[in-house]
Amino acid sequence: MTAELLVDARNATGECPVWQVAEQALYWVDIPAKRLHRWTAAGALDSWSALEMLACIAAREGGGWLAGLESGLFALQAEASGQLSGERLVALDHAQPAMRCNDGRCDRQGRFLVGTMVQDMAQGAPAGRLYSHAAGEGARLLLDDLIVPNGLALSPDGRTLYLSDSHPSRQLIWAFDYDPDTGTPSNRRLFVDMNAHPGRPDGAAVDVDGCYWICGNDAGLIHRFTPDGRLDRSLSVPVKKPAMCAFGGRNLDTLFVTSIRPGGDLSDQPLAGGLFALDPGVQGLPEPAFAG
Ligand SMILES: O=C1O[C@H](CS(=O)(=O)O)[C@@H](O)[C@H](O)[C@H]1O
């Protein structure tokens, strides 16, 4: 199964692909470049600039985007000028200076779940947190003691929440029972110890069978784990650092993969930072919008 290069985007840190059914378009971000990108199935490419590092996005039911940046959660609009305009809805009270949002997505009720991390990942500071934000409310702290929160995804029934920590000292994926009424995770348990598999756990998506697809960063692989944590299969991309995957396309049966372009010699991975498409052989689920 060959990965198709869709955009030679050369993203420093391409993350958070989100398929928009009405537009038949994929949006994603480049975190340090502070940019939102769009690729349409018709082949058009656009991008917009933000004022802070832009880590994660969710479409809002009312239009525009809910986005996790450095200082908090913002309502953003993509302007014809190429800028993202908007306002901060929630200021995040970070555990220490120089932090930002990382992975984020909505639960099946439309609450936004978002992790935070120190900007300099090499510090390895466990200052990261997981928050939940519902429309009209602030940020509710769900978890702390995270280094690089990632891999957020929900089971098809919305009652199991997945979360990973990508830091080399962790490389773990947890599952939680998740109460859709209250948005509260409980019964934390180890889902997969990625130290036993190639690659560090990065961004993830769940398919119609409830299997969990996660990027194996540094290994050029996207792994599919069954709900009981068994490795079912692995697909490869021609870059070492796939960062996050999302289902999209006309039948939600394409797996889009963003990637990271590290510094240094790239002669063995010239397409690093590109956007890729794979045929996973299974459909995904529609991405919930933010209820607000
Ligand atoms: O900044 C980030 O970095 C890591 C990937 S890497 O260590 O730079 O390869 C990633 O897990 C994280 O989601 C991202 O925001």
Image (cartoon, grey):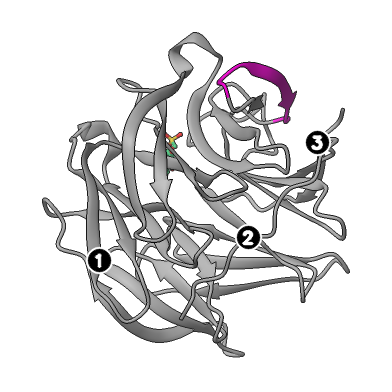
The magenta span reads 228-238
User: Mark 3 Cα within 10 Å, few/some/many (few <14, many 20+)?
Assistant: many
| Mark sitting on residue 287 | 2
Image quarter for residue 1? Answer: top right
- Specify the label residue 205 is tagged with: none
Q: Residues within 10 Å of mark 1 (few under 14, many from 20)?
A: many
Taking the magenta stretch, the answer to whether it contains residue 233 is yes
Residue 43 rendering spot, x and y as whole percentages: 85, 66
Estimate the x, y position of residue 40 in percent, counting from the top left. 79, 68
Mark 2, Cα crowd under 10 Å, few <14 / some 14-19 / many 20+, is many
Mark linked to residue 139:
1
Q: Are marks 2 and 3 in contact (CB under 8 Å)?
A: no
Measured as percent of width and height from the top left, residue 114 is found at 37, 55
Q: Residue at x 37, y 76 (%)?
A: 74
Tell me the kind of residue under disc 2: Glu
Do residues under tags 2 and 1 come within 8 Å of each other at their CB atoms? Answer: no
Is tag 2's residue or tag 1's residue first in the polypeptide sequence?
Answer: 1
Sequence-first tag of 2 and 3: 3
- Seen at 55% across and 20% down, the residue is 229
Question: For residue 208, which quarter of the picture?
Answer: top right
- For residue 42, above or below residue 220: below
Q: Is residue 115 magenta?
A: no
Q: Secondary structure at mark 2?
A: loop
Q: Would you name the residue on which mark 3 appears?
A: 280
The residue tagged with tag 3: helix, strand or loop? loop
Give the residue type at disc 3. Answer: Pro
Secondary element under disc 1, as helix, strand or loop, is strand
Please identify, in this view, whether the residue under mark 3 or under mark 1 is nearer the observer.
Answer: 1
